[in-house]
Image: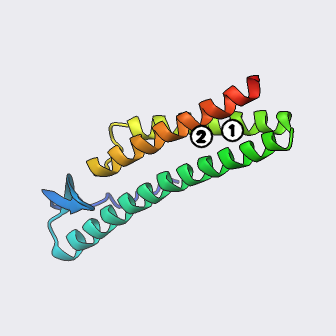
Amino acid sequence: MCVLLDQPTVRETCQMTIPVVGRSIQANVPEDDDQRAESVRLLQASLETRLKGIQSQFALAFTLCKTAETELLYGRIHEAQRLTYKIRHSCESLRHRLAEPHHHMPEYSRDGFQQQLKRLEDQIQQIESRLTH
């Protein structure tokens, strides 16, 4: 037996510039005012969620750095090496995430994240240099 499903309806959309956390992005949003308002709200929420996710990754990486330094202080070299590997992986993940061209974010956030990435890389190098001594 063959069942035909209703075809989805095409809704009118328009190109709109949406101000989002200090930056405007271009997006296709429905022309209906209620749908437009919901689209804008969802775009803003998704940007805020992405920014919080990146910031959480940085917080975790810096916490792991402190933990690795503590492991070194107590002579647990193997644990410090294991943590350093995880930190390095997290750093690469952040670098990739920040370089994604479709990852819309305000320029000031990108600059701040790049500065945090540099600080993280410096801390990793300090830990790794202590591991080799």
Where residue 100 appears, as percent x and y from the top left, is 38, 37
Give the residue at mark 2.
Answer: 90
Compared to 6, does 115 lie above or below?
above
Extreme residue in the top direction = 132
- Picture disc at residue 67: none
Tell me, for residue 86, which label it has, or none.
1
Q: Are marks 1 and 2 in contact (CB under 8 Å)?
A: yes
For disc 1, the neighbor class at 10 Å (few under 14, some 14 to 19, many from 20) is: some
Q: What element carries label 1?
A: helix
Residue 32 x %, y %: 16, 71
Q: Position of residue 69 (x, y in %)?
A: 72, 43
Residue at position x 25%, y 61% in the image = 20
User: Left or right of 12: which side holds 97?
Assistant: right
Residue 89 at x, y percent in the picture: 62, 35
Can residue 97 be seen here? yes
- Label 2 sits on a secondary structure element that is helix
Of 49 and 94, the residue lying toward us: 94
Q: Amino acid type of disc 2? A: Ser
- Specify whether 52 is left or right of 14: right
